[in-house]
Image: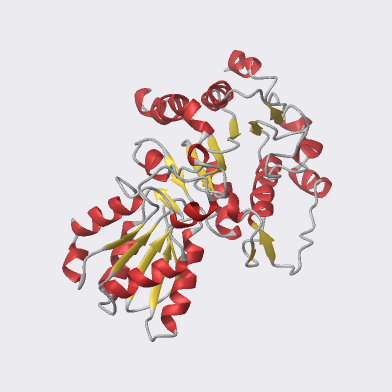
Amino acid sequence: MAAARAAFSRVAPAIASVRARPSLALKRAAFARGYATASENSMTVRDALNVAMEEEMMRDENVFILGEEVARYNGAYKVTKGLLDKFGEKRVVDTPITEMGFAGIAVGAALSGLRPICEFMTFNFAMQAIDQIVNSAGKTYYMSGGNVPCPVVFRGPNGAASGVGAQHSQDYAAWYGSIPGLKVVSPWSAEDCKGLLKAAIRDPNPVVFLENEMMYGVTFPMSSEAMSDNFTLPIGKAKVEREGTDITIVAHSKMVTHSLEAADILAKEGVKAEVINLRSIRPLDIDTIKASVKKTNRLLIVEGGFPAFGVGSEICAQIVESEAFDYLDAPVERVTGADVPTPYATNLEALAFPDTPVIVKVAKRALYRTN
């Protein structure tokens, strides 16, 4: 173990003796952060991710960040802003443009007992490192007979952004969600991002943390509990964002926004839609979905990924295979991205992904209110 730590001395600090360390309270005071937003209890998604990493790096000296432009440039999307100044070059590490290389360093560091946060500029680029994520990180704990855990977090923007073309617009939730050994998180709100990222960093398993570029600048209210530096959310537990009795709408990431907007429109027509924010893709909280379906008797699943073999397909299959199937009064409906490579042209791109009117239309179809 000592030799392994020495090998990674350039990307993470060696563990000093406990007596030589400053107390956690002193470190917190040195890095004290004021949440200077319009409201004391509100935060952007970007800031929530930044705060989560800062708090966990103060809490545990084994935690470090590596990736392209995460240090001197403050991150491609400024998610790691200020962390280099606070923690230095040994814990906030700029890497060359080689996803396979720095993902491999992250996995090796995790296998040696450190807790790396590996940032991909986009998960589309992580395809260069998918062997490291799936085979090296995802399977080593099992193949070692439970002796070698791999506590690494792979994070970055996932899914469609705006005007970035087919090769930079894919949603990888279903890709990674199919792999035993990985945990896969897809947060929506600032509270989701802070609580789930902190939980992911502390988790002994490899976690794929799928953010959304379009959500980084969105401000959300934060509960007093969420502002605490000990706040975490359980991985594998969905959240009912809006209660209802007529139809269940299940979504993750940016699609939660559209689903809630659709629920507002449906409410004006007397339809009470229940909206579930998945938060976690793997483990999938199918129990919360089943409980809702038993109440509403209708199910609509919304996602930004391709329709074939997607998250919605899996949810539909598990509902059909469960006792909740007997409660359905209409076929399960899915709203997904179009089954084409994402167009670059703005007018076509807008037609390639779900929006609020489409969700409203399909919800009405499930309710037999329109064709």
- Give the side of residue 13 with respect to residue 208, left or right: right
Pinpoint residue 351: horizontal percent, then vertical percent.
Answer: 44, 57
Where on the picture, by quarter, is residue 72? top right
- Give the side of residue 13 with respect to residue 155, left or right: right
Q: Identify the residue at image location x=42%, y=75%.
A: 243
Pinpoint residue 155: horizontal percent, then vertical percent.
Answer: 56, 40
Pinpoint residue 336: horizontal percent, then vertical percent.
Answer: 37, 55
Where on the picture, by quarter, is residue 285? bottom left
Pinpoint residue 102: horizontal percent, then vertical percent.
Answer: 59, 24
Q: Identify the residue at image location x=66%, y=33%.
A: 64
Between 20 and 358, the one lying in front of the other is 358
Between 7 and 321, the one lying in front of the other is 321
Between 38 and 263, the one lying in front of the other is 263
For residue 356, above or below residue 181? below
Between 344 and 313, the one lying in front of the other is 344
Quarter that holds the C terminus: bottom left
For residue 206, above or below residue 131? below
Quarter that holds the N terminus: top right
